Amino acid sequence: MQTIIETVQPYVSTIATAAIGVLTTIVLAGLNNVKVKVNTWLETRTTAAQREVIHKIAGEGFAFAQTAFKEAGGERKLQEALQYASLTLSSQGIVVSQVELRSAIEKAYLEYKAKTKTVLATEAQPSEEVTQAAAKEAVSGLAAKLNDFLAQATAEVSNIVPVQVQSEPEPIPVSTEATQTPATTE
């Protein structure tokens, strides 16, 4: 049982790595969708210069909350980032609704998360050549272990079952008389 687990483990690792890559791609595509929607929404409500300032300050607010409140939960960090960004924007004379500000901070968070996921995915995912080499090695190892297992099983069977060799085959008695049995139909 242990040898089966050891032989299957490289395949499971390869499949898990591929699944993580696919999931990362799906998550990044979803984050990109959200980013596009937030940008579109913000573009309709502010000027280009204001959007740039809002995004910078929202990014600063997110970074401030992320570093200053490491132990706090996500909602507390969001509230702190909102407070920081709101005070900073109002001091510069830019009036932004809480919804717009929250959207900008959420965008900064999604960009941060996308960057960290991309870094993790590229570090965790081996190249295709490495994966193919590992698969070939695993198949070779599986074949060798299967041969060993079959050889061991054959040896155990030959040790358990004594083989009797007959020097001459015994004749099978055959009746020379023909016998008929009547068939009945019901």
Image (spheres, grey):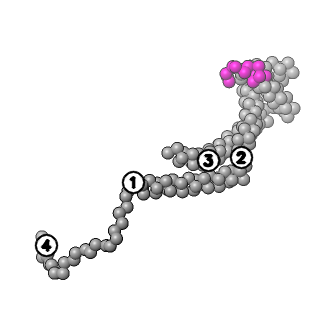
* Residue 179 placement, left or right of 4: left
Q: Earlier in the sequence, mark 2 or mark 4?
A: 2
Reading the image, the residue beneath label 1 is 160
Point out the frontmost of discs 3 and 1: 1
Mark with earlier residue (3, 1): 3
Cα–Cα span, label 2 and label 1: 47 Å
Q: Residue tagged by mark 3?
A: 10
Disc number lying in front (2 or 3)? 3
Amino acid type of the residue that numbered disc 2 sits on in the rendered structure: Pro
* Dots 4, 3 in contact, CB < 8 A: no
Crowding at mark 4 (Cα within 10 Å: few <14, some 14-19, many 20+): few
Q: Nearer the viewer, residue 158 or 123?
A: 158
Q: Is residue 152 located in the magenta-colored stretch of the structure?
A: no
Residue under numbered circle 4: 185
Question: Nearest the camera: 176 or 123?
Answer: 176
For label 1, the SS is helix
> Could you tell whether 5 is left or right of 24 in the image?
left
Q: How many angstroms separate mark 1 from mark 4 (CA)?
A: 50 Å
Q: Earlier in the sequence, mark 2 or mark 3?
A: 3
Where does the magenta region start and end?
Answer: 64-74
Residue at 60%, 53% in the rendered image: 141
User: Would residue 182 appear left or right of 23 to someone viewing this image?
Assistant: left
Q: Secondary structure at mark 2?
A: loop
In the rendered structure, which amino acid carries the disc numbered 1? Ile
Q: Position of residue 179 (x, y in %)?
A: 15, 78
Q: Earlier in the sequence, mark 4 or mark 3?
A: 3
Could you tell me residue 130's position as x and y percent?
A: 71, 50
What's the residue at 67%, 21% (across, down)?
A: 73
Q: Residue at x 38, y 56 (%)?
A: 161
Mark 3 Cα-neighbour bin, 10 Å: few <14, some 14–19, many ≥20: some
